[in-house]
Image (spheres, rainbow, N blue to C red):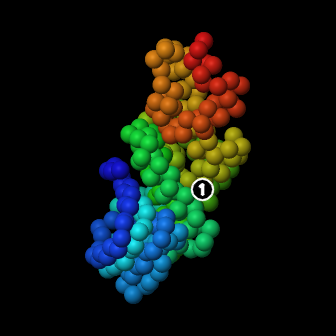
Amino acid sequence: MIDPSFSVARYAIGGEWETSGDFDDVVIVNVKSDVYRWEIDGERGFGSRAPFLIRPGHDFTCYARDSDVVNIFLSPDVLRDVAATAFGHEGPVVFGSAETIDPRRAEYMMTAATVASEYMESGTFRHPLVRASLFHTLAMAALQCFPLSADPAERPLSAAALQEKHRLAVRFIDDHASLPITVGDIANAAGITITQLNAAFRAHHGTTARSYLWTVRLSAARTDLLVSDPTSTDLAELAGRWGFADLDRFTRGYRAQYGEGPEATLGR
């Protein structure tokens, strides 16, 4: 699965396999089963259920046997931009270790990689809104799960400033919900970090910016359902077009929001 911002690859390794080299991208390796041993510039580890990160320009070697592996490739420039928006981090992103911060974050990274591979195999990755959301999830997972060499900065804002930033963010979401925008794009449009963005939305909506975007897209999907032909409309395709990769989750959210399932709205 390839996108200009990132790529995801799944490998089924039968028997024994060895490789070495380096990468231009940041690569997160997620080993789902059996044997996988790695070494990066003298740092060693076992990859099974313990994601690790290969930094650009670092020598990498590994030995694997009968392994199921999901690799996530992110460009350093992309991570720099996401870190600047999310945390106010200035300059390039430098990771302090190949290993995750703790077991809880390791499990979170594995879950994100599993979701990415499922999107790849199901074909929902072809929808631009789904693809943008997945990219943001993977980039943030990398920044949150692996140790950075410096703590991210955060700029304090007054209540009045947050209110104005919230207004800008809401207008941006309402105007661009049909496009493959992410939470990072919303924060950029408002001129604040993601942490500050969510603080503003919690203060004014009791929810996050992502949840507000989700609600706006749910409303747009309802509008489409009301004018669509029930004999030819594919609910999964419609949900994917509005950024919902999982039809079951879309259906549950739609029913909670409108008191009926999408198929009932479509049948009117």
Mark 1 crowd level (few <14, some 14–19, many ≥20, 10 Å Cα): some
Q: Nearer the viewer, residue 100 or 186?
A: 100
> Residue at the front extreme?
15
Coordinates of residue 149 in the picture (x, y in percent)? 48, 76
> Which residue is found at the position 39% from the left and 82% from the top?
39
What secondary structure is marked by label 1? helix
**Residue 58 in sight from this viewpoint:** no
Using residue 231 as the reference point, say whether residue 252 is left or right of it: right
Vertical placement of 160 versus 97: above or below? above
Looking at numbered disc 1 in the image, what kind of residue is underneath it? Answer: Thr
Coordinates of residue 176 in the picture (x, y in percent)? 47, 34
Q: Nearer the viewer, residue 17 or 110?
A: 17
Disc 1 designates what residue? 195
Coordinates of residue 68 in the picture (x, y in percent)? 43, 63
Q: Nearer the viewer, residue 145 or 228?
A: 228
Picture mark count: 1
Q: Nearer the viewer, residue 208 or 115?
A: 115
Which quadrant is home to the C terminus? top right
> Which residue is found at the position 50% from the left and 31% from the top?
236
Coordinates of residue 76 in the picture (x, y in percent)? 36, 64
Using residue 134 as the reference point, say whether residue 102 is left or right of it: right
> Which residue is found at the position 62% from the left and 50% from the top?
198
> Which residue is found at the position 49% from the left and 37% from the top?
243
Using residue 266 as the reference point, say whether residue 25 is left or right of it: left
Using residue 148 as the reference point, say whether residue 41 is left or right of it: left
